[in-house]
Amino acid sequence: MAGMPEEPEVDVDRLQETIDEPPLDTLLRNIALSTALLAAFGAVAALRAGGTVNEALVLKTEAGRLQAEASDQWAYYQAKGIKTNIEEQTRAIWSAAGKTPPPAIESSIQRYAAEQKDIERAAREKEHARDEKSEEADRLLAHHHRFANSVALLQVAIALGAVAALTRQRLVWFGSGLLGLLGAGLFVITLLR
């Protein structure tokens, strides 16, 4: 006679443990979500910080190039001034000898003076452009520092979020959130300026 099938064995203790477990730790899920949002904000802030410093470096390089060009213009200006002085000395020698200077000397003096005015204008324009580039670079560097500070605050907030997840301490998580809000706020304020 075939025996009756045995009843399936059910581990009642394990079943009870499974029933008693909470479905998902809400605190841990909230910490993970807020930390992920802070990480995303931190990544964007880091990109903006890097972008602004790169733009500032390009502008500072451009300002240096403009300074070199302005210096070249001022050297050219001085060369024209030296030529004017030589022509004036030549005219004085002719006059001291009681002779009338050739008309080409006076013409050269007038031409060099006019050229100096044009060269001076070009040099001042280069200096003005240099100053504008340098001021814009300084403004971008100030933005970079604020973006970098927001990144630092967000990174500390992320680290505190990890500590909160490991220790399941709400107070640490609130600290993470507070620092994260400060970092995000600094980022947004800097972005809108």
Image (cartoon, rainbow, N blue to C red):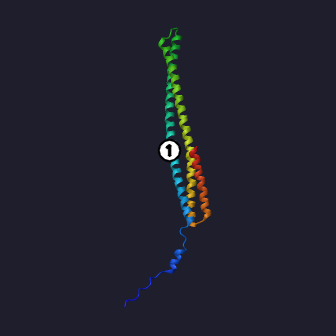
Quadrant of the image containing the C terminus:
top right
Quadrant of the image containing the N terminus:
bottom left
- Write down the residue under mark 1: 54
127 or 90: nearer the eye? 127
Q: Find residue 158 and report its horizontal and vertical position in percent.
A: 55, 58
Q: Residues within 10 Å of mark 1 (few under 14, many from 20)?
A: some
Q: Residue at x 49, y 37 (%)?
A: 62
Query: Compared with residue 162, is residue 68 higher up or lower down, i.e. above or below?
Result: above
Q: Residue at x 54, y 63 (%)?
A: 29
- Please tell me whether mark 1 sits on a helix, a strand or a loop: helix
Q: Find residue 115 and report its horizontal and vertical position in percent.
A: 50, 21
Q: Residue at x 53, y 34 (%)?
A: 130
> Which amino acid is tagged 1?
Asn
Q: Find residue 64 and report its horizontal and vertical position in percent.
A: 50, 37
View extreme (right): residue: 171
View extreme (left): residue: 1
